[in-house]
Image (cartoon, rainbow, N blue to C red):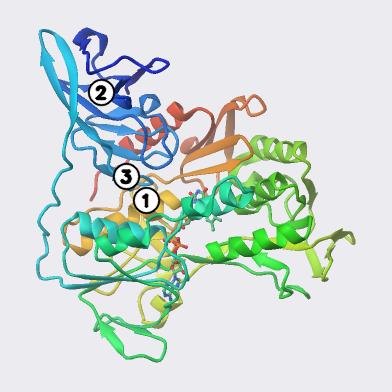
Amino acid sequence: MAEATSGESGPDLALGIALAELPENGLLAGQVGGEAVLLARSGDGVFAVGAACTHYHGPLAEGLMVGETIRCPWHHACFSLRTGEALRAPALDPLPCYRVEREDGRIFVREKLPREAVKPCPAASLRRIAIVGGGAAGNAAAETLRREGYDGELVLFSAENSLPCDRPNLSKDYLAGSAPEEWVFLRSAQFYREQEITIELGKPVVGLDAGTRALRLGDGPQVAFDAILLATGAAPRRLSVPGAVLPHVLTLRSLADCRAIIARAAEGRRAVVVGASFIGLEAAAALSTRGVAVSVVAPEAVPMERVLGPDLGAFLRKLHEEHGVRFHLGAGVAAIEPEEVALSNGEHLPADLVLCGIGVVPETALAAEAGLAVGNGVLVNPFLETSAAGIFAAGDIASWPDRLSGERIRIEHWVVAERQGRIAARNMLGLRKRCDIVPFFWTQQYDVSLSYVGHAPEWDKAELEGSPSERDCRVGYFTNERKRAVATIFRDAESLAEELAFEQAMPAAG
Ligand SMILES: Cc1cc2nc3c(=O)[nH]c(=O)nc-3n(C[C@H](O)[C@H](O)[C@H](O)COP(=O)(O)OP(=O)(O)OC[C@H]3O[C@@H](n4cnc5c(N)ncnc54)[C@H](O)[C@@H]3O)c2cc1C
């Protein structure tokens, strides 16, 4: 684990520092020509790279160095110190690298180095690849294929009408009105053009022939591909009560959904959020930041208790109440009227907007109808290949054999989807990368960011250390004394260390 040393702005590394100032496995934040640079010493190697994560500009000097890599404290992106390459999501872009010179026991950071050239493609026989899904996994896969040197035809079909977007932002800054819409897109149209990735927006794939690897859109003919990635994500669950289809009853998955919520929130000032899920609570925070009066209706007694335990659940409730959100717990929705919601306990809540955040269902119909093996998701092997050769699945739909738990799992996290998209892309090219991922997610509600590593769908002990109200705590989740996951609030270094410990605990591949 690296020790981080960072000053206000850090030394001018072009002027040099004594090697002794940079301890073994040490990090030092400095600058070169006005740009923030991170100096890192791993064994005999001294590396200089950009100091800010290319995802949300997290401070890498506060991250964790593992061998010749650096992990971001905020959302666990990982970069190669030697090449700057973004090795793990959520970062998509590499870090700039600088030339380092040693002279008389001093280290000098010189000019920026050119980016590494794209490698030759390992699978020259592949000429036509299709990706079904324009989300986290689909976009990551498309970019990775090009980065790995694949130069054949590459088509990404998306049911959405907009370019792949940073979905987590849709329930946070963008919904709150604090991020402009241009921040929401993962890449520009120009990026895809330059990369020769054909993006077919508003084009849902309606049929898949697993034998010939052919896709069908609308009434058109089938088109065959050499390899296909299914990354169709998940769809929000909907209520099935009277009034559930009224126009002010909305869900949140796509940018279009988010725009519709923002438009409703601008017209009306009272929202009922159904479900104290992460999306429900994040949306409640974002809407109340917009000045909307928000009520949250959920069946549980403590929000998020099943996932986060009683302490963090109670903390989140209090946090929301401090911002004016009202909870109606132990209750369900009986019916929805144009201007109010009737609850199962007889209460009536005024509502110009009803947002359902009651979970999602993986979009497995395409795979199931094609005869692929489907259980709780599309079943894939450790290389993310489905039961049909040459057809892969990644993201919210993929159910994969997790080496850490020894169980088949399916996860609905942004970072997991992007990492799987990358792995699947490389496996399409025959690189045989196992999907050995320690799940990570984060949630942001008001000024509180919570990180969660591991996977504990159920647990028998939740052990709190520190104080949620002081925004400084961790909770470990255990089953039979075996640690399965850890949630932290503003203990980023601990979250990174826990992630590494889970990785190191992973049994060897059989
Ligand atoms: C509002 C919101 C906030 C979130 N916040 C967080 C967070 O803070 N942290 C976190 O870890 N996770 C978060 N998540 C979850 C995360 O976004 C998902 O786990 C992730 O997007 C899954 O990626 P995916 O590629 O599997 O699916 P998606 O990103 O949903 O992409 C699926 C794509 O497939 C397309 N599609 C579906 N069917 C077809 C078809 N037949 N043909 C063509 N295209 C099709 C869809 O239109 C979509 O473009 C959030 C999710 C939402 C909705």
Picture coordinates of residue 59, whole percent (x, y):
40, 29
Q: Which residue is mark 1?
A: 406
Picture coordinates of residue 181, whole percent (x, y):
52, 54
Q: Considering the numbered disc 3 on the image, is that residue within a helix, a strand or a loop? A: strand
Q: Residue furthest front?
A: 33
139 sits to left or right of 477: left
Q: Which residue is mark 3?
A: 88
Look at the picture and state if 491 lies above or below 245: above
Of 143 and 14, which appears nearest the observer?
A: 14
The N terminus - image quarter? top left
Of tags 2 and 1, the one toward the viewer is 2
Q: Which residue is mark 2?
A: 40
Q: Considering the numbered disc 2 on the image, is that residue within a helix, a strand or a loop? A: strand
Task: Name the N-terminal-most of marks 2 and 1.
Answer: 2
Q: Considering the numbered disc 1 on the image, is that residue within a helix, a strand or a loop? A: loop
Look at the picture and state if 478 lies above or below 266: above
Look at the picture and state if 148 lies above or below 324: below
Ligand 1 is within 8 Å of the C-beta of the residue at disc 3: no
Of tags 2 and 3, the one toward the viewer is 2
19 sits to left or right of 282: left
Of 153 and 440, which appears nearest the observer?
A: 153
Picture coordinates of residue 402, whole percent (x, y):
36, 52
Total labels: the figure holds 3
Q: Residue at x 69, y 56 (%)?
A: 275
Q: Residue at x 83, y 63 (%)?
A: 344
Task: Name the N-terminal-most of marks 1 and 3.
Answer: 3
